[in-house]
Image (spheres, rainbow, N blue to C red):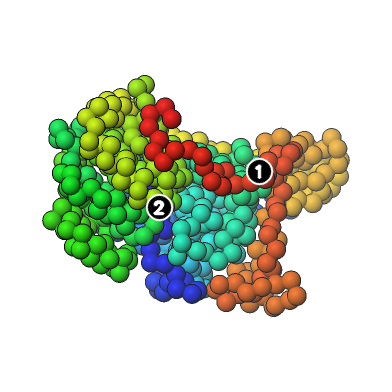
Amino acid sequence: MNSRHDGAAPDGTGPPNTAPDRTSPRDIGAGGTRYGSTRYGSTSPDSAASDNTLPLAPGRRTVQVVVPVDGGDPDRPSGGHVYNGRVCAGLAAAGWRAVQHPVRGSWPWPDRAAEQCLADELAALEDGAVVLIDGLIASAAAYVVVPAARRLAVVVLVHMPLGEQFPGHHVDDAGRRESAVLSAARAVITTSEWTRARLLARYPLAADIIHVCRPGVDHAEPAMRTATGSELLCVATVAPHKGQDAVLAALASLTDRAWRCRFVGPLDRDPEFVARLREKARVTGMADRIDFTGPLTGEALDRAYAEADLLLLASHAETYGMVITEALARGLPVIATEVGGIPEALGSAPSGRPGLLVPPGDPAALSAAVRLWLDDANTRRRLRVAARERRPLLAGWDRTCAQVAVALDAAEADATLCRLAECLPDSGSDPGSGPVVGHSAVAAPGSRRDQVASAVAGRGTECLPAKEFEPTAGFPKAHDQAPSSKAGPDPSGRVGPVSTPVPKTRTGSDPRVSSLIGSGSTSSPSIRTSRS
């Protein structure tokens, strides 16, 4: 999907952080009433075992959703913000009530105050609560999330893996932090199969805990279209990682053709970049054909799609590309870069692919694709037919919400089963015997606890969070660890180990993949058309 990481790039240690504070949770479920957290009982294995109390889920299930505050500007919605909002609103139909907990801070570059704010939010939740945390927050806050995952059923929603950041948006120590957080989670949600494959390639995760929940799309009326296909549309934050400079470079070689291009998206993320684009349009004589509208929402955005013939998306990194399915919902063909989850979002129709794919950062290939669209009526006809065929194949948000609910169900069941292992006494020894560590129960063969532990292992639930992210006496200690010969500096001023954690996987075999999916050069032609 469109990257959540559209904020200003960090300068040195990261961008200035917004002063964090705790905001009031917002209930998104039907009826407008906030309900309390799910509770499974005491966190103490000894106390639970002594009275043989079993953790039972309540009749009404609640998921606590932790999201960044700065992603919530309704006039400048990011793809991740739209996804979060639609999922929270739609979970009620799937049996879950969503309570949002906005957390301030310049995520994924939190300072100490932002991390403490997150820690306070999580500490306020009752033991056993199911918590869905936006990966923009969770993956960057291992010192907070890993300890919290010992008592909460944590689910991480990964919009964009931290290790996949575009130039200028690097997150220090991203892989080590993200690996520990995802290994400690009960479930992980990704917005594309591409993202799932990248996570499995990067980290020693069990495949069965990662759930793919692609973004949905709303039904829309078909675009009006022109005979010549001259109305071009680019919907994305105007910033270097979205590739608008490549679009202008491509169009500069097509000034002898009739076209107009509208760029829809925020203009204040990188003002210098926007200024260069405007100057490029002026010196090449394209200023009267280029329109930078700024962000559009609602009916204004609907009109922009309705008046377009073709969507252009030249991103350098995308985990899905929600604007692609928004265009296809209106029968608009797409010319886009072949990166990340874009091919997955574009999909195919019975007659072929409803668009053209070009390499990222290649204005010549992009120019050739647009020229083909403008010059060849047969190409326009073929792509328009495929786009119309793709329209009814697009899934709505109801399916997305149902898939997210399945992931929450799995996390809840996994947490309950593991707590059963902690609560059941060993029939062959004193209550509470058989140490319980994390999600793993150890007991004498044939005992009640051993039987439950075997069931836990069979469900693939053994996963010990990395000890280096476990503070010994509360969260603030993570900032004050003493340096040692095996330690290195952390971007927030902390000192901690630098070795990459390798948590236990949740299956009997190691699902680790030796190389990244899609790395290396490709031998595919510059332009990929239908069935290529």
Give 200 or 364, whichever is nearer the viewer. 364
Q: Amino acid at mark 1?
A: Val
**x%, y% of residue 460?**
68, 39
Which residue occupies 86% across, 37% down? 445
Q: Nearer the viewer, residue 483 or 303?
A: 303
Name the one closer to the observer, 236 or 422: 236
> In this figure, which residue is indicated by the disc labeled 2?
361
The residue carrying mark 1 is: 513
Q: Give above or below for 179 relative to 445.
A: below
x then y, percent, for residue 353 = 37, 30
Residue 471 visible at all: yes
Compared with 296, 352 (above or below) is: above
Give the alpha-carbon distance from disc 2 to disc 1, as whole Å: 28 Å
SS at circle 2: loop
Q: Amino acid at mark 2?
A: Gly
Report the mark closest to the observer, 2 or 1. Answer: 2
Residue 387, position as x, y percentages in the image = 29, 30
- Residue at x-position 48% and y-position 67%: 109
Place residue 71 in its image quadrant. bottom left
| Residue 398 placement, left or right of 463 | left
Q: Is residue 23 above or below residue 483?
A: above
Q: Which mark is residue 130?
A: none
